[in-house]
Image: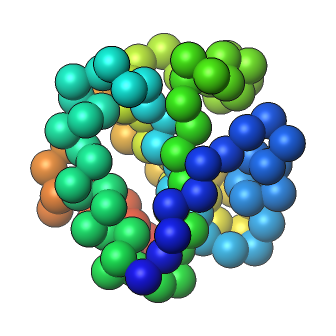
Amino acid sequence: MSDIIYLTEETYGPITTGSSAAVVDFYADWCGPCRSMIPVFEACAMEYDGIRFCKVNVDEHKKLAIQNRVLGIPCFMFFKNGKMLKRIDGAVDELTFKEALNALL
């Protein structure tokens, strides 16, 4: 099981530029579609040991949202070896989310 890591401006860079696989969820507490993705995100964090599961609260870290051109939430970015391999804007079904995760393995 992977713990979910809450990122800040200081911790975002090392996670997304490192050699590890990571998925970053840009979200807000008030966002309905973001809340609908919580069970999927948490279940996958328990299932995928080789991937870091991270979250960025866009209300608390606006600078990161702007730097990453997050225009809508939820926004999921999938990284491996320092490169973003995929981006999903909006809520999706579990199968679609897992397909993106499988590409990181």
Q: Name the residue: 31% across, 69% down.
A: 44
105 or 63, which is in the foreground?
63
Tell me: 65 left or right of 55. right
Percent of width and height locating residue 24 = 53, 49
Tell me: 45 left or right of 33. right
Q: Does residue 96 show up?
A: no
**Which quadrant is home to the N terminus?**
bottom left
Q: Name the residue: 38% across, 40% down.
A: 88
Q: Quadrant of residue 60?
A: top right
Q: Name the residue: 79% across, 66% down.
A: 18
Percent of width and height locating residue 73 = 39, 24
Q: Is residue 16 shown above or below 77?
A: below
Q: Is residue 86 shown above or below 88?
A: below
Q: Does residue 34 show up?
A: yes
Q: Is residue 35 shown above or below 29?
A: below
Give the mark count: 0
Percent of width and height locating residue 59 = 56, 17
Q: In which quarter of the image is residue 37?
A: top left
Q: Name the residue: 39% across, 69% down.
A: 45
Q: Quadrant of residue 92?
A: top left
